[in-house]
Image: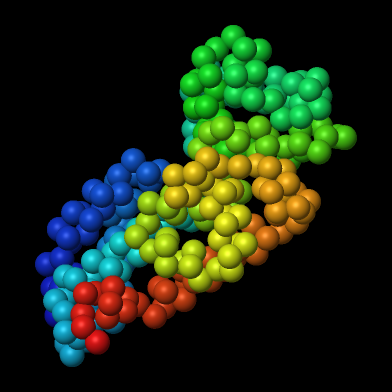
Amino acid sequence: MAARDRMIESNLRLVVKIAKRYMNRGLPFLDLIEEGNMGLIKAVERFKLSKECRFSTYATWWIRQSIERALVNQSRTIRLPVHVSDDINKFIKISRELVHKFNREPSVAEIAEAMGVDPSYIRRLMVLVKKTYSIEHPMGENSDYSLIDTIEDTSSVDPSGLIEDLDKFAHVTEWLESLGDNEREILTLRFGLEDREPQTLDTIGRRFGVTRERIRQIEAKSLEKLRKIMEEKELSGPSDAELGLRS
């Protein structure tokens, strides 16, 4: 036990160093360190002297994995200033009105004009909306549109809490390659991965010749697959290739 504790204590600076790379992604710095420490503990428990790599190399993988997993599963509840909360409520109200008026999802420019603000401010509100409101809920009793459909021109939407920062993570390419062609393409379009513009369910549905509900089902199934891949990866640990070892 004493040797284990010494290994942990001697690598705490490594955790801090790695945690700094993930600042400003939605978790406080101290929380990042705490998650990194959990990864460090796993590394200490699973490391074998027979491995042809330094412990720091092995621990780095586990620390990053733990932090990235925390970012993916982080709480989406945030506190907003009163005036911003008021603007969000106004944005939602006007968005509903424009959907009913045009019988389609309004553009950023149309919402901005109706609110009398700059389009860039609307985009910032949209980012906050996706973090604080149920964006899958219909805008009206007889409406086919939801808030999620009004934000095609902004950053990616993450109804499950899995994808939001996924394209920044080191293993995203590997994870996506494990999906079927249609599943991978739908997630890429839906969340604006690979520097693409995020698309709505309706837009993707038209592209594939299916309903928006079918796209939603494929999206949910694909996200669940990614979640299982993440969990399996955490259980198995890093491969020799990921540690830079020759087979």
68 or 86: nearer the viewer? 68
Q: Is residue 132 visible?
A: no
15 or 112: nearer the viewer? 112
Report which quarter residue 37 is drawn in.
bottom left
**Going 80% across and 20% down the picture, which residue do you hit?**
101
Residue 207's x, y, as percent?
69, 49
The colour scheme used here is: rainbow
Q: How many marks?
A: 0
Report which quarter residue 242 is drawn in.
bottom left
Instruction: Judge whether 7 appears above or below 137 on screen.
Output: below
Report which quarter residue 89 is drawn in.
top right
**Going 30% across and 44% down the picture, which residue do you hit?**
23
Left or right relative to 25: residue 230: right
Residue 166's x, y, as percent?
44, 54
Q: Quadrant of the N terminus?
A: bottom left
Name, please, the residue furthest toward the bottom. Answer: 50
**Going 28% across and 77% down the picture, which residue do you hit?**
241
Q: Is residue 108 visible?
A: yes
Name, please, the residue furthest toward the top. Answer: 116
Instruction: Judge whether 15 appears above or below 41 on screen.
Output: above
Left or right relative to 139: residue 123: left
Left or right relative to 214: residue 163: left
170 or 40: nearer the viewer? 170
**Going 70% across and 19% down the picture, which residue do you hit?**
94
Residue 247's x, y, as percent?
24, 87
Residue 153's x, y, as percent?
56, 32
Instruction: Judge whether 33 appears above or below 111 on screen.
Output: below
